[in-house]
Amino acid sequence: MVNNDQTVSVDLIPDNIREIELFVDRVCDQLFINDTYYGNILMSLTEMFNYLVEHASSDKLEITYHSNYENICISFYPVDSQVVTAFSQKIDLDAFVGEESHRHLFLIHSLVDKIHASKSEVLSLEFDISALHNEIYQSRKSLLNDYFSKQGMEEKVKHQND
């Protein structure tokens, strides 16, 4: 069984972007995430890391993830209260043309399903992956049905007393 609660500690320096990429690779491999979701998660986390490198008050960042196979929640700690406030507000990209930090915020808001900003220096990004696992389930079910039909076995619904 996959460990669905993992943490990585990263120094907030631009060269450590590779640590973020490795973290995303590991999470997506463990949860069988396809390329579309992988791209959203990778882009969101790299944009978040770049934003925090520019705006963080600490030197180190803890990144954790948890999944129930319907959602992935990736949390960042500690996050400055100004960063939490920035993520809590609606982003109007037209009002901030040319400002790199607002581009980061806009991309992150566009790529994640939910953002949870808490006053306890934790910022969480949530991704809905339930459709992905339903797609895998349907594909596997179809393959099994094809296999059994070629073997001459019919699908039989079991009753409680069978």
Image (spheres, rainbow, N blue to C red):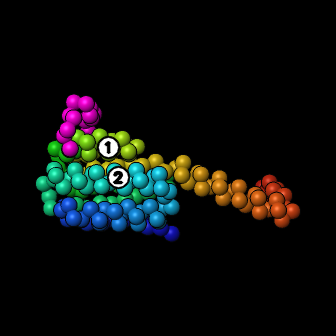
Between residue 157 and residue 54, name the one nearer to us.
Answer: 54
Give the farthest residue toward the left. 57
Residue 85 visible in the shown view: no
Q: Secondary structure at mark 1?
A: helix
Q: Which residues are magenta?
A: 86-100
Q: Point out the tag, 1 or 2, that comes first from the N-terminus.
A: 2
Asked if the stretch drawn in magenta spans residue 56, the answer is: no
Residue 138 visible in the shown view: yes
Left or right placement of residue 5 versus residue 144 in this view:
left
Q: Residue at x 51, y 69 (%)?
A: 1
Between residue 92 and residue 75, name the one nearer to us.
Answer: 92
- Return the x and y of residue 118 as percentages of the image width and height: 26, 46
Q: Which amino acid, by three-letter code, is at mark 1?
A: Leu
Q: Secondary structure at mark 2?
A: helix
What residue is disc 2 on? 43
- Return the x and y of residue 106 as percentages of the image width and height: 29, 40
Residue 107, numbered circle: 1
- Return the x and y of residue 140 as percentages of the image width and height: 66, 59
Mark 1 near mark 2, Cβ–Cβ under 8 Å?
Answer: yes
Give the farthest residue toward the bottom. 1
Residue 156, numbered circle: none
Q: Residue at x 25, y 42 (%)?
A: 103
Q: Residue at x 20, y 44 (%)?
A: 101
Q: Give the Cα separation between the discs numbered 1 and 2.
A: 8 Å
Label 2 crowd (10 A; few <14 / some 14-19 / many >=20): some
Left or right placement of residue 15 versus residue 74 in this view:
left
> For residue 7, which quarter of the picture?
bottom left
With respect to residue 131, does 21 lie above or below? below
> For residue 76, which quarter of the picture?
bottom left
- Return the x and y of residue 120 as percentages of the image width and height: 22, 50
Q: Which amino acid, by three-letter code, is at mark 2?
A: Met
> For residue 100, which quarter of the picture?
top left
